[in-house]
Amino acid sequence: MMVRITALLLLLVVFVSFGKEKDWKLYDKIVLVVNGQPVLKSELELAMQWFGIKDRKEAAKKLIDQILVAQAAEKSGIRVSPKEVEEAIARIARANNLGSVEEFKKKLEEENLSYTEFKDLVKRELLIQRYIQIHLRRVLFGGIKEGKQVKLRKVRIIFLSSKDKDFKEKYRFLRENLKPENFSELAKKYSDDPITAEKGGLLGEVKKGDLIKKLDEAIWNKKPGEIFEVPVKNGVYFVYIESEKEQMINQQPTGEEITKKLKQEYEIQLNKLRQQATIEYLDKSLQ
């Protein structure tokens, strides 16, 4: 039982090996050359197990793509240290219930697979991961600010709870005496919302849609400078729109959006690499 890391998702997942090569030979041969980099028959057989593909031609395509992106990563200055490769292999070993890298090496030997070639394959996968996370993120998001101009209103509130035994008296007093200049002071004294009360009723700067529907609609149907009431099920809000301004709000893409964009950019870059690549098929059956 072995594990592979897919080029895009780069997650450790278990795959079933094909078992020992029945016709394993003591010699190897070059089957492909990718931009001057030779690919051995044994590397292709390892890739078939890594990618979980039985068709040699299809596995060759996946292997070529992997090599192309790894080459592009190194050209971009991206590096992976031998220690990082060893640590990744140790994680793969543990994922396969093997106690050490040495045990994993023996498992590879039992399946007639080269540990050196396996290290090269893991290194390429780590390069691809870093290429996506560093280079492609820089291409997509570096220096680009996505956002939109929105209106923000600075709002202060006083909430009176209808459960308060003095509700009617407080309500009558505030209705008759509230003014912009004393709103903050009276909020501290009378508001039943302790969080905003200690800040003089300051709710903060809000944009349309930030608050509960009833408050939101009332605030955006009034003009800055107005004081008004918004009755709710458990009491009443006195609301003061202190000011209004326009501001550019950055819209950070969500995790799903980032993943989608990275996948799209990965395919774009991979197609470019394919078009620019020089591939020699010494084994014509792989074309």
Image (cartoon, helix red, strand yellow):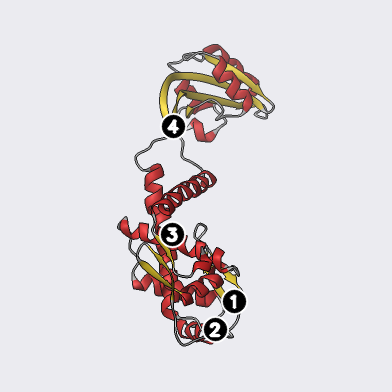
Task: Give the number of the mark in front: 3 or 2.
Answer: 2
Question: Which residue in the protein does label 4 denote?
Answer: 147
Contact flag, marks 2 and 4 (Cβ < 8 Å): no
Question: Which residue in the protein does label 2 denote?
Answer: 111
Q: Is residue 173 above or below residue 262?
A: above
Contact flag, marks 2 and 1 (Cβ < 8 Å): yes
Circle 3: element type:
helix
Task: Give the number of the mark in front: 1 or 3.
Answer: 1
What residue sits 48% from the left and 50% below the top?
Answer: 267
Q: Mark 2 or 1 closer to N-term?
A: 1
Question: Which residue in the protein does label 1 denote?
Answer: 17
Residue at mark 2 to residue at mark 4: CA–CA distance = 54 Å
User: What is the x, y in percent for residue 162?
Assistant: 67, 26
Task: Give the number of the mark in front: 1 or 4.
Answer: 1
Residue at mark 1 to residue at mark 3: CA–CA distance = 24 Å
User: What is the x, y in percent for residue 121?
Assistant: 44, 70
Q: Mark 2 or 4 closer to N-term?
A: 2
Residue at mark 4 to residue at mark 3: CA–CA distance = 28 Å
